[in-house]
Image (tube, rainbow, N blue to C red):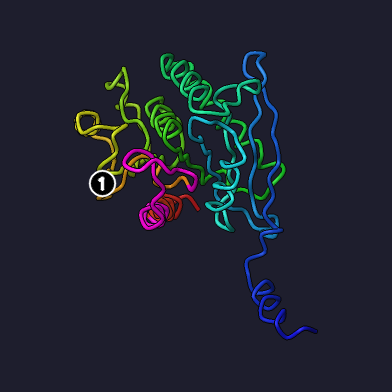
């Protein structure tokens, strides 16, 4: 064998078996309307793992969202990427994404209903993949982070909710009294899309509701700090150091809340 190729081959053999990561489309419907999410998991793991609903950013169920889910899932979680828009709505640029996200944010009851339906679809995947239905949580990114917080405010019976650089506002702050599990908000301190007034209002909302909540401010981070493709300096920008810290904070929370559910 060519000696120059040997180190590369050995490195490839020692690397994680990404071929074991599976992504499957999952069609479902809500009130007769077609939706299509994606199930992501490592099929080399045969023991039941916790399940997470993932609500993606405003581009919805996309190849980038699937890759992000693979990164998060690893051998720890089964992830179902929920479709909050509907099968026929797949934004391809910021203009289309803004229109889709704005329309749904204007109807929070509908957003919650679609999030709740996605939780039920996640649960149903336990018939296909080893998943511990006693250990379920939800995570969301940007628009999806706001969607996950609305799901928490709806009283969804999950073990934990995590928002990454998500919108924090809600038209019904009193609904925070319905929250039934810990909430973790991972926020860029310099995020222009989620200004200090919104952070302060969220803090007041959670405090008044006596919710179990945390808000982590990452210094120097802006919007979309976990999104590898984000490259608008000062506004939407990937920050690998902060992303790693945020993912660790997510894992720490789920380790804690899932421990008592075994």
> Which residue is painted at 41% across and 35% down in the image?
142
- Is 149 situated above or below 240? above
> Which residue is painted at 26% across and 42% down in the image?
190
Residue 229 lies in the magenta-colored region: yes
Q: Quadrant of the N terminus?
A: bottom right
Image-quadrant location for residue 209: top left
Give residue 38's position: percent from left, percent from top.
64, 38
Give residue 148's position: percent from left, percent from top.
43, 33
- Is 109 situated above or below 8? above
**239 or 157: nearer the viewer:** 239
> Which residue is painted at 39% across and 44% down in the image?
237
Give residue 236's position: percent from left, percent from top.
38, 39
Q: Is disc 1 placed on a helix, strand or loop? A: strand
Q: Residue furthest right?
A: 1
Image-quadrant location for residue 12: bottom right
Which residue carries the number 1 mark? 217
Give residue 132's position: percent from left, percent from top.
58, 48
> Which residue is painted at 29% across and 41% down in the image?
213
Q: Crowding near pointer 1: few (<14 within 10 Å), some, many (20+)?
A: some
For residue 151, side relative to residue 184 (left or right) = right
- Magenta region: which residues? 228-248
**90 or 233: nearer the viewer:** 233
- Is 125 situated above or below 15? above
């Amino acid at each position: 064998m060519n000696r120059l190729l040997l180190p590369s081959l050995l490195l490839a053999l020692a690397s994680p078996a990404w071929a074991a990561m599976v992504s499957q489309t999952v069609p479902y419907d809500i009130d007769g309307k077609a939706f299509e999410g994606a199930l992501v998991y490592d099929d080399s793991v045969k023991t039941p793992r916790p399940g997470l609903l993932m609500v993606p950013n405003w581009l919805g169920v996309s190849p980038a969202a699937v890759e992000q889910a693979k990164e998060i899932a690893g051998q720890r979680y089964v992830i179902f990427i929920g479709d909050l828009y509907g099968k026929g709505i797949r934004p391809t640029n910021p203009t289309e994404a803004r229109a889709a996200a704005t329309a749904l944010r204007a109807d929070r009851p509908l957003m919650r209903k679609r999030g709740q339906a996605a939780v039920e679809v996640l649960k149903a995947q336990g018939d296909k993949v080893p998943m511990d239905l006693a250990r379920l949580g939800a995570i969301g990114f940007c628009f999806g982070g706001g969607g996950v917080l609305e799901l928490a405010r709806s009283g969804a019976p999950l073990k934990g909710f995590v928002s990454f650089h998500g919108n924090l506002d809600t038209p019904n702050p009193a609904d925070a009294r319905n929250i039934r599990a810990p909430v973790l908000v991972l926020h860029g301190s310099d995020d222009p899309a989620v200004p200090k007034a919104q952070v302060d209002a969220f803090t007041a909302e959670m405090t008044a509701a006596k919710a179990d909540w945390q808000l982590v401010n990452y210094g120097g981070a802006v919007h979309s700090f976990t999104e590898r493709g984000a490259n608008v300096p000062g506004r939407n920008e990937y920050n690998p150091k902060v992303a790693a810290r945020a993912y660790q904070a997510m894992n720490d929370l789920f380790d804690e809340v899932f421990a008592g559910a075994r």
